[in-house]
Image: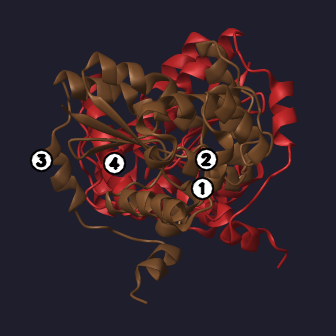
Chain colours: A red, B brown
Amino acid sequence: MRTLDFYFDYISPYAYFSWLKVGALCQKYDVELQAHPVVFGKLLDHWGQLGPAEVRPKKAALYRYCDRYARLHGFDFNPPARHPYNPLPALRLSLPEVCGTGHQHRLISAIFEAGWSRGADLSCRDTLAGILQEQGLDSEYLLTTIDSDAVKQALKYSTEQAIRRDVFGVPTFIIDDQLFWGNDQLEHIELYLQGNDPLDADWVDELLVRDRGIDRKSFLARQAPD
Amino acid sequence: MRTLDFYFDYISPYAYFSWLKVGALCQKYDVELQAHPVVFGKLLDHWGQLGPAEVRPKKAALYRYCDRYARLHGFDFNPPARHPYNPLPALRLSLPEVCGTGHQHRLISAIFEAGWSRGADLSCRDTLAGILQEQGLDSEYLLTTIDSDAVKQALKYSTEQAIRRDVFGVPTFIIDDQLFWGNDQLEHIELYLQGNDPLDADWVDELLVRDRGIDRKSFLARQAPD
Protein backbone atom coordinates (compact mmCIF):
# COMPACT_ATOMS: atom_id res chain seq x y z
CA MET A 1 0.00 0.00 0.00
CA ARG A 2 1.29 3.45 -0.85
CA THR A 3 2.03 5.86 1.94
CA LEU A 4 1.53 9.61 2.17
CA ASP A 5 3.78 11.16 4.81
CA PHE A 6 2.21 14.26 6.34
CA TYR A 7 4.55 16.53 8.30
CA PHE A 8 2.84 19.05 10.56
CA ASP A 9 3.09 21.33 13.57
CA TYR A 10 0.03 22.66 15.44
CA ILE A 11 1.57 26.13 15.12
CA SER A 12 0.41 26.33 11.49
CA PRO A 13 -3.14 27.13 10.36
CA TYR A 14 -2.28 25.77 6.91
CA ALA A 15 -1.39 22.45 8.50
CA TYR A 16 -4.86 22.52 10.10
CA PHE A 17 -6.63 23.37 6.87
CA SER A 18 -4.89 20.59 4.99
CA TRP A 19 -5.43 18.08 7.81
CA LEU A 20 -9.16 18.65 7.33
CA LYS A 21 -8.83 17.32 3.79
CA VAL A 22 -5.89 14.97 3.54
CA GLY A 23 -7.60 12.05 5.27
CA ALA A 24 -10.41 11.87 2.72
CA LEU A 25 -7.91 12.24 -0.11
CA CYS A 26 -5.89 9.29 1.16
CA GLN A 27 -9.01 7.17 1.54
CA LYS A 28 -10.16 8.02 -1.97
CA TYR A 29 -6.88 6.82 -3.47
CA ASP A 30 -6.27 3.96 -1.05
CA VAL A 31 -3.14 5.52 0.39
CA GLU A 32 -1.98 5.09 3.97
CA LEU A 33 -1.72 8.41 5.82
CA GLN A 34 1.27 8.62 8.13
CA ALA A 35 1.21 11.72 10.31
CA HIS A 36 4.54 13.06 11.58
CA PRO A 37 4.58 15.77 14.25
CA VAL A 38 7.65 17.99 13.75
CA VAL A 39 8.89 21.18 15.40
CA PHE A 40 8.40 23.97 12.87
CA GLY A 41 10.75 26.27 14.83
CA LYS A 42 13.54 23.72 14.36
CA LEU A 43 12.89 23.59 10.62
CA LEU A 44 13.19 27.39 10.55
CA ASP A 45 16.40 27.23 12.58
CA HIS A 46 17.85 24.64 10.24
CA TRP A 47 17.03 26.41 6.98
CA GLY A 48 17.68 29.91 8.38
CA GLN A 49 14.16 31.10 7.68
CA LEU A 50 11.59 33.21 9.50
CA GLY A 51 8.12 31.89 10.16
CA PRO A 52 5.04 33.80 8.95
CA ALA A 53 4.32 34.90 12.54
CA GLU A 54 7.79 36.47 12.70
CA VAL A 55 7.17 39.12 10.03
CA ARG A 56 4.55 41.55 11.32
CA PRO A 57 2.73 42.40 8.08
CA LYS A 58 2.97 38.78 6.90
CA LYS A 59 1.21 37.55 10.01
CA ALA A 60 -1.52 40.16 9.47
CA ALA A 61 -1.95 39.27 5.78
CA LEU A 62 -2.07 35.55 6.50
CA TYR A 63 -4.58 35.90 9.32
CA ARG A 64 -6.84 37.81 6.93
CA TYR A 65 -6.31 35.12 4.33
CA CYS A 66 -7.12 32.40 6.88
CA ASP A 67 -10.27 34.17 8.08
CA ARG A 68 -11.52 34.46 4.49
CA TYR A 69 -10.54 30.86 3.74
CA ALA A 70 -12.31 29.49 6.81
CA ARG A 71 -15.51 31.47 6.17
CA LEU A 72 -15.59 30.39 2.53
CA HIS A 73 -15.19 26.77 3.63
CA GLY A 74 -17.75 27.00 6.42
CA PHE A 75 -15.77 26.67 9.62
CA ASP A 76 -14.54 28.97 12.38
CA PHE A 77 -11.13 30.58 12.40
CA ASN A 78 -10.24 31.19 16.03
CA PRO A 79 -6.49 30.66 16.51
CA PRO A 80 -4.77 29.39 19.64
CA ALA A 81 -5.18 31.92 22.48
CA ARG A 82 -1.54 32.92 22.29
CA HIS A 83 0.44 32.60 19.09
CA PRO A 84 3.17 31.65 18.56
CA TYR A 85 3.25 29.33 21.57
CA ASN A 86 5.18 26.29 22.78
CA PRO A 87 3.82 23.37 20.73
CA LEU A 88 6.10 20.69 22.24
CA PRO A 89 3.62 19.02 24.65
CA ALA A 90 0.93 18.83 21.96
CA LEU A 91 3.40 17.48 19.40
CA ARG A 92 4.83 14.88 21.78
CA LEU A 93 1.34 13.65 22.67
CA SER A 94 0.69 13.17 18.96
CA LEU A 95 3.59 10.81 18.33
CA PRO A 96 2.07 7.42 17.47
CA GLU A 97 4.28 5.73 20.07
CA VAL A 98 2.78 8.01 22.75
CA CYS A 99 -0.94 8.25 21.98
CA GLY A 100 -1.13 4.90 20.18
CA THR A 101 -1.38 4.35 16.43
CA GLY A 102 -5.10 3.64 16.63
CA HIS A 103 -5.88 6.94 18.34
CA GLN A 104 -3.43 9.20 16.58
CA HIS A 105 -5.52 10.63 13.74
CA ARG A 106 -8.48 11.28 16.01
CA LEU A 107 -6.28 13.04 18.59
CA ILE A 108 -4.62 15.19 15.94
CA SER A 109 -8.05 16.25 14.67
CA ALA A 110 -9.17 17.12 18.19
CA ILE A 111 -6.06 19.18 18.98
CA PHE A 112 -6.15 21.06 15.68
CA GLU A 113 -9.85 21.80 16.07
CA ALA A 114 -9.51 23.01 19.68
CA GLY A 115 -6.55 25.20 18.73
CA TRP A 116 -7.65 26.74 15.47
CA SER A 117 -11.44 26.74 15.59
CA ARG A 118 -12.00 27.29 19.31
CA GLY A 119 -9.00 29.41 20.33
CA ALA A 120 -7.71 26.93 22.93
CA ASP A 121 -4.29 27.60 24.44
CA LEU A 122 -2.42 24.59 23.08
CA SER A 123 0.63 25.27 25.24
CA CYS A 124 -1.47 24.71 28.39
CA ARG A 125 -1.34 21.22 29.90
CA ASP A 126 -4.80 21.54 31.46
CA THR A 127 -6.23 22.31 28.05
CA LEU A 128 -4.44 19.31 26.57
CA ALA A 129 -5.68 17.13 29.43
CA GLY A 130 -9.24 18.17 28.58
CA ILE A 131 -8.77 17.27 24.94
CA LEU A 132 -7.27 13.88 25.82
CA GLN A 133 -10.16 13.12 28.18
CA GLU A 134 -12.71 14.05 25.51
CA GLN A 135 -11.00 11.43 23.35
CA GLY A 136 -11.24 8.84 26.10
CA LEU A 137 -7.48 8.80 26.60
CA ASP A 138 -5.61 8.59 29.91
CA SER A 139 -4.53 12.20 30.26
CA GLU A 140 -2.59 11.81 33.47
CA TYR A 141 -0.50 8.95 32.16
CA LEU A 142 0.12 10.55 28.77
CA LEU A 143 1.07 13.95 30.16
CA THR A 144 3.63 12.24 32.40
CA THR A 145 4.94 10.12 29.54
CA ILE A 146 5.80 13.12 27.39
CA ASP A 147 8.29 14.37 29.97
CA SER A 148 10.46 11.30 29.51
CA ASP A 149 13.73 11.59 27.64
CA ALA A 150 12.66 8.87 25.25
CA VAL A 151 9.65 10.88 24.08
CA LYS A 152 11.62 14.11 23.83
CA GLN A 153 14.16 12.26 21.69
CA ALA A 154 11.40 10.78 19.54
CA LEU A 155 10.09 14.23 18.57
CA LYS A 156 13.61 15.44 17.95
CA TYR A 157 14.23 12.41 15.76
CA SER A 158 10.99 12.96 13.86
CA THR A 159 12.05 16.55 13.11
CA GLU A 160 15.56 15.52 12.09
CA GLN A 161 14.21 12.84 9.78
CA ALA A 162 11.96 15.45 8.19
CA ILE A 163 14.93 17.76 7.60
CA ARG A 164 16.85 14.86 6.08
CA ARG A 165 13.96 14.49 3.61
CA ASP A 166 14.22 18.21 2.73
CA VAL A 167 11.13 19.27 4.67
CA PHE A 168 11.46 23.04 5.13
CA GLY A 169 7.91 24.01 6.12
CA VAL A 170 4.54 22.70 7.23
CA PRO A 171 2.37 21.18 6.02
CA THR A 172 4.58 19.00 3.84
CA PHE A 173 3.34 15.90 2.04
CA ILE A 174 5.70 13.25 0.67
CA ILE A 175 4.50 10.43 -1.59
CA ASP A 176 6.97 8.17 -3.44
CA ASP A 177 9.71 10.72 -2.59
CA GLN A 178 7.73 13.51 -4.23
CA LEU A 179 7.61 16.48 -1.85
CA PHE A 180 4.63 18.85 -1.88
CA TRP A 181 4.56 21.85 0.43
CA GLY A 182 1.54 23.86 1.49
CA ASN A 183 -2.22 23.58 1.74
CA ASP A 184 -2.58 24.85 -1.83
CA GLN A 185 -0.80 21.73 -3.16
CA LEU A 186 -3.68 19.36 -2.50
CA GLU A 187 -4.96 19.80 -6.03
CA HIS A 188 -1.57 18.82 -7.46
CA ILE A 189 -1.32 15.92 -5.01
CA GLU A 190 -4.66 14.61 -6.23
CA LEU A 191 -3.50 14.75 -9.85
CA TYR A 192 -0.38 12.88 -8.82
CA LEU A 193 -2.38 10.19 -7.03
CA GLN A 194 -4.63 9.83 -10.09
CA GLY A 195 -1.59 9.26 -12.28
CA ASN A 196 -2.23 12.60 -14.01
CA ASP A 197 0.74 14.56 -12.69
CA PRO A 198 1.49 17.25 -15.30
CA LEU A 199 5.08 17.64 -14.05
CA ASP A 200 7.98 17.17 -16.44
CA ALA A 201 10.49 16.12 -13.77
CA ASP A 202 13.47 15.87 -16.14
CA TRP A 203 12.85 19.39 -17.35
CA VAL A 204 12.70 20.76 -13.81
CA ASP A 205 15.89 18.88 -12.93
CA GLU A 206 17.56 20.65 -15.85
CA LEU A 207 16.29 24.00 -14.58
CA LEU A 208 17.59 23.38 -11.09
CA VAL A 209 21.20 22.94 -12.21
CA ARG A 210 21.24 26.18 -14.19
CA ASP A 211 23.71 28.78 -12.93
CA ARG A 212 22.83 31.35 -10.33
CA GLY A 213 23.44 34.85 -11.59
CA ILE A 214 23.71 36.88 -8.42
CA ASP A 215 23.11 36.39 -4.71
CA ARG A 216 22.50 38.64 -1.73
CA LYS A 217 25.44 39.05 0.66
CA SER A 218 23.34 37.69 3.52
CA PHE A 219 22.67 34.52 1.50
CA LEU A 220 26.32 34.01 0.54
CA ALA A 221 27.43 34.50 4.15
CA ARG A 222 25.21 31.62 5.24
CA GLN A 223 26.57 29.34 2.49
CA ALA A 224 30.21 29.84 3.54
CA PRO A 225 31.80 26.85 5.27
CA ASP A 226 32.04 27.35 9.04
CA MET B 1 -11.94 55.29 -10.31
CA ARG B 2 -10.58 52.71 -7.89
CA THR B 3 -6.97 51.69 -8.13
CA LEU B 4 -5.28 48.34 -7.68
CA ASP B 5 -1.60 48.71 -6.84
CA PHE B 6 0.42 45.77 -8.09
CA TYR B 7 3.92 45.38 -6.64
CA PHE B 8 6.23 43.07 -8.53
CA ASP B 9 9.77 42.01 -9.31
CA TYR B 10 10.73 40.02 -12.42
CA ILE B 11 12.61 37.67 -10.11
CA SER B 12 9.32 36.01 -9.07
CA PRO B 13 7.42 33.42 -11.14
CA TYR B 14 4.34 34.08 -9.01
CA ALA B 15 4.48 37.74 -9.99
CA TYR B 16 4.50 36.54 -13.61
CA PHE B 17 1.59 34.16 -13.13
CA SER B 18 -0.52 36.83 -11.47
CA TRP B 19 0.43 39.46 -14.04
CA LEU B 20 -1.11 37.18 -16.66
CA LYS B 21 -4.48 37.52 -14.90
CA VAL B 22 -4.59 40.79 -13.00
CA GLY B 23 -5.16 42.97 -16.06
CA ALA B 24 -8.36 41.20 -17.04
CA LEU B 25 -9.55 41.27 -13.43
CA CYS B 26 -9.07 45.03 -13.23
CA GLN B 27 -10.89 45.53 -16.52
CA LYS B 28 -13.80 43.37 -15.38
CA TYR B 29 -14.30 45.46 -12.25
CA ASP B 30 -13.39 48.83 -13.78
CA VAL B 31 -10.33 49.27 -11.59
CA GLU B 32 -7.19 51.11 -12.65
CA LEU B 33 -4.11 48.87 -12.54
CA GLN B 34 -1.01 50.64 -11.28
CA ALA B 35 2.12 48.54 -11.66
CA HIS B 36 5.02 49.22 -9.28
CA PRO B 37 8.40 47.63 -9.92
CA VAL B 38 10.14 46.98 -6.61
CA VAL B 39 13.39 45.24 -5.63
CA PHE B 40 12.41 41.96 -3.96
CA GLY B 41 15.92 41.58 -2.49
CA LYS B 42 15.44 44.88 -0.65
CA LEU B 43 12.12 43.70 0.76
CA LEU B 44 13.89 40.58 2.04
CA ASP B 45 16.68 42.71 3.53
CA HIS B 46 14.16 44.96 5.25
CA TRP B 47 12.01 42.21 6.76
CA GLY B 48 14.96 39.89 7.47
CA GLN B 49 13.60 37.09 5.31
CA LEU B 50 15.03 34.63 2.83
CA GLY B 51 13.67 34.38 -0.68
CA PRO B 52 12.37 31.06 -2.04
CA ALA B 53 15.50 30.74 -4.21
CA GLU B 54 17.65 30.98 -1.08
CA VAL B 55 16.45 27.73 0.52
CA ARG B 56 17.58 24.81 -1.65
CA PRO B 57 14.64 22.42 -1.18
CA LYS B 58 12.16 25.31 -1.32
CA LYS B 59 13.46 26.40 -4.71
CA ALA B 60 13.16 22.80 -5.93
CA ALA B 61 9.62 22.38 -4.57
CA LEU B 62 8.48 25.71 -6.03
CA TYR B 63 9.97 25.01 -9.45
CA ARG B 64 8.05 21.74 -9.53
CA TYR B 65 4.91 23.61 -8.45
CA CYS B 66 5.46 26.24 -11.14
CA ASP B 67 6.04 23.63 -13.86
CA ARG B 68 2.78 21.88 -12.90
CA TYR B 69 0.92 25.19 -12.67
CA ALA B 70 2.13 26.38 -16.07
CA ARG B 71 1.30 23.09 -17.81
CA LEU B 72 -2.18 23.02 -16.24
CA HIS B 73 -2.75 26.59 -17.45
CA GLY B 74 -1.35 25.97 -20.91
CA PHE B 75 1.83 27.98 -21.08
CA ASP B 76 5.56 27.30 -20.95
CA PHE B 77 7.59 27.45 -17.76
CA ASN B 78 11.13 28.29 -18.79
CA PRO B 79 12.70 30.55 -16.16
CA PRO B 80 15.32 33.23 -16.75
CA ALA B 81 18.59 31.62 -17.92
CA ARG B 82 20.29 32.35 -14.61
CA HIS B 83 18.30 32.67 -11.41
CA PRO B 84 18.46 34.58 -9.17
CA TYR B 85 19.90 37.38 -11.30
CA ASN B 86 20.25 41.15 -11.18
CA PRO B 87 16.77 42.50 -11.95
CA LEU B 88 17.64 46.20 -11.61
CA PRO B 89 17.91 47.16 -15.32
CA ALA B 90 14.62 45.40 -16.14
CA LEU B 91 12.88 46.98 -13.16
CA ARG B 92 14.18 50.47 -13.92
CA LEU B 93 13.03 50.20 -17.55
CA SER B 94 9.57 49.34 -16.24
CA LEU B 95 9.09 52.50 -14.20
CA PRO B 96 6.30 54.49 -15.87
CA GLU B 97 8.49 57.60 -15.89
CA VAL B 98 11.10 55.69 -17.90
CA CYS B 99 9.17 53.62 -20.45
CA GLY B 100 6.14 55.92 -20.56
CA THR B 101 2.78 55.27 -18.92
CA GLY B 102 1.20 54.28 -22.22
CA HIS B 103 3.78 51.54 -22.87
CA GLN B 104 4.30 50.26 -19.36
CA HIS B 105 1.86 47.36 -19.20
CA ARG B 106 2.86 46.07 -22.61
CA LEU B 107 6.55 46.23 -21.72
CA ILE B 108 6.01 44.42 -18.42
CA SER B 109 4.16 41.65 -20.25
CA ALA B 110 6.98 41.34 -22.77
CA ILE B 111 9.72 41.20 -20.13
CA PHE B 112 7.86 38.66 -17.98
CA GLU B 113 7.11 36.48 -20.98
CA ALA B 114 10.69 36.55 -22.27
CA GLY B 115 12.03 35.77 -18.80
CA TRP B 116 9.67 33.09 -17.58
CA SER B 117 8.33 31.43 -20.72
CA ARG B 118 11.37 31.70 -22.97
CA GLY B 119 14.27 31.50 -20.54
CA ALA B 120 15.78 34.87 -21.51
CA ASP B 121 18.59 36.23 -19.35
CA LEU B 122 16.84 39.29 -17.93
CA SER B 123 20.04 40.64 -16.40
CA CYS B 124 21.55 41.01 -19.88
CA ARG B 125 21.25 44.44 -21.50
CA ASP B 126 21.35 43.04 -25.03
CA THR B 127 18.39 40.82 -24.21
CA LEU B 128 16.53 43.80 -22.77
CA ALA B 129 17.40 45.86 -25.85
CA GLY B 130 15.84 43.16 -28.03
CA ILE B 131 12.65 43.18 -25.97
CA LEU B 132 12.42 46.98 -26.11
CA GLN B 133 12.89 46.95 -29.89
CA GLU B 134 10.19 44.32 -30.33
CA GLN B 135 7.90 46.74 -28.47
CA GLY B 136 8.88 49.58 -30.81
CA LEU B 137 10.69 51.42 -28.03
CA ASP B 138 13.99 53.31 -28.32
CA SER B 139 16.28 50.81 -26.64
CA GLU B 140 19.46 52.86 -26.89
CA TYR B 141 17.90 55.90 -25.27
CA LEU B 142 16.12 53.92 -22.54
CA LEU B 143 19.12 51.80 -21.61
CA THR B 144 21.13 55.01 -21.18
CA THR B 145 18.37 56.66 -19.16
CA ILE B 146 18.30 53.89 -16.55
CA ASP B 147 21.89 54.64 -15.57
CA SER B 148 20.95 58.13 -14.37
CA ASP B 149 20.82 58.85 -10.67
CA ALA B 150 17.25 60.05 -11.00
CA VAL B 151 16.06 56.67 -12.29
CA LYS B 152 18.06 54.74 -9.72
CA GLN B 153 16.47 56.89 -7.03
CA ALA B 154 13.02 56.35 -8.53
CA LEU B 155 13.28 52.55 -8.17
CA LYS B 156 14.67 52.94 -4.67
CA TYR B 157 11.76 55.23 -3.82
CA SER B 158 9.23 52.80 -5.29
CA THR B 159 10.66 50.02 -3.09
CA GLU B 160 10.69 52.21 0.01
CA GLN B 161 7.10 53.27 -0.58
CA ALA B 162 6.13 49.62 -0.86
CA ILE B 163 7.83 48.83 2.46
CA ARG B 164 6.02 51.76 4.05
CA ARG B 165 2.77 50.14 2.92
CA ASP B 166 3.84 46.83 4.55
CA VAL B 167 4.71 45.06 1.32
CA PHE B 168 6.89 42.10 2.34
CA GLY B 169 6.77 39.94 -0.80
CA VAL B 170 5.82 39.83 -4.46
CA PRO B 171 3.34 39.85 -5.98
CA THR B 172 1.43 42.12 -3.62
CA PHE B 173 -1.89 43.74 -4.49
CA ILE B 174 -3.29 46.71 -2.56
CA ILE B 175 -6.85 47.98 -3.09
CA ASP B 176 -8.39 50.53 -0.71
CA ASP B 177 -5.54 49.83 1.73
CA GLN B 178 -6.37 46.09 1.73
CA LEU B 179 -3.17 44.14 1.17
CA PHE B 180 -3.24 40.77 -0.61
CA TRP B 181 -0.05 38.77 -1.10
CA GLY B 182 0.56 36.00 -3.57
CA ASN B 183 -0.79 34.60 -6.80
CA ASP B 184 -3.25 32.43 -4.89
CA GLN B 185 -5.04 35.54 -3.57
CA LEU B 186 -6.67 36.44 -6.88
CA GLU B 187 -9.83 34.57 -5.94
CA HIS B 188 -10.14 36.56 -2.70
CA ILE B 189 -9.36 39.79 -4.55
CA GLU B 190 -12.19 39.09 -6.97
CA LEU B 191 -14.62 38.53 -4.07
CA TYR B 192 -13.44 41.80 -2.58
CA LEU B 193 -13.95 43.68 -5.86
CA GLN B 194 -17.44 42.17 -6.17
CA GLY B 195 -18.34 43.44 -2.71
CA ASN B 196 -18.46 39.85 -1.44
CA ASP B 197 -15.39 39.86 0.80
CA PRO B 198 -16.00 37.20 3.47
CA LEU B 199 -13.45 38.82 5.82
CA ASP B 200 -14.51 39.88 9.30
CA ALA B 201 -11.88 42.60 9.67
CA ASP B 202 -12.78 43.54 13.26
CA TRP B 203 -12.40 39.93 14.32
CA VAL B 204 -8.98 39.63 12.70
CA ASP B 205 -7.90 42.91 14.33
CA GLU B 206 -8.83 41.37 17.68
CA LEU B 207 -6.78 38.26 16.87
CA LEU B 208 -3.76 40.30 15.92
CA VAL B 209 -3.49 42.00 19.31
CA ARG B 210 -3.61 38.73 21.23
CA ASP B 211 -0.49 37.97 23.26
CA ARG B 212 2.44 36.06 21.85
CA GLY B 213 3.22 33.00 23.95
CA ILE B 214 6.80 32.24 23.01
CA ASP B 215 9.36 33.35 20.45
CA ARG B 216 12.54 31.93 19.00
CA LYS B 217 15.76 33.54 20.18
CA SER B 218 16.68 34.51 16.64
CA PHE B 219 13.36 36.37 16.33
CA LEU B 220 13.74 38.19 19.65
CA ALA B 221 17.30 39.24 18.79
CA ARG B 222 16.04 40.99 15.66
CA GLN B 223 13.32 42.82 17.59
CA ALA B 224 15.76 44.28 20.12
CA PRO B 225 16.45 48.01 19.68
CA ASP B 226 19.85 48.66 18.07
Between A53 and A12, the residue placed more toward the observer is A53
| Residue at the spot of label 2 | B142
For label 1, the SS is loop
Q: Are the residues under marks 2 and 3 on the same chain?
A: yes
Question: What label does residue B197 carry, if any?
Answer: none
Viewer-nearest of labels 1 and 3?
1
Q: In the figure, residue A219 lies in which quadrant?
A: bottom right
| Residue at the spot of label 3 | B202
Residue B13 x %, y %: 61, 36
Subunit ID for the residue under disc 3:
B
Category of crowding for the residue at label 2, using alpha-carbon neighbours closer than 10 angstroms: few (below 14), some (14–19), many (at least 20): some
Between A218 and A201, the residue placed more toward the observer is A218
Category of crowding for the residue at label 3, using alpha-carbon neighbours closer than 10 angstroms: few (below 14), some (14–19), many (at least 20): few
Q: State the residue at coordinates (22%, 62%).
A: B210
Viewer-nearest of labels 2 and 3?
2
| Residue at the spot of label 1 | B146
| Residue at the spot of label 4 | A61
Which numbered disc, 1 or 3, marks the residue that appears first in the sequence?
1
Question: Distance between the Cα atoms at labels 3 and 4?
Answer: 14 Å
Given the image, on which type of amino acid does mark 3 rest? Asp
Given the image, on which type of amino acid does mark 2 rest? Leu
Viewer-nearest of labels 2 and 4?
2
Q: Do the residues under discs 2 and 4 have CB atoms within 8 angstroms?
A: no
Q: Are the residues under marks 1 and 3 on the same chain?
A: yes
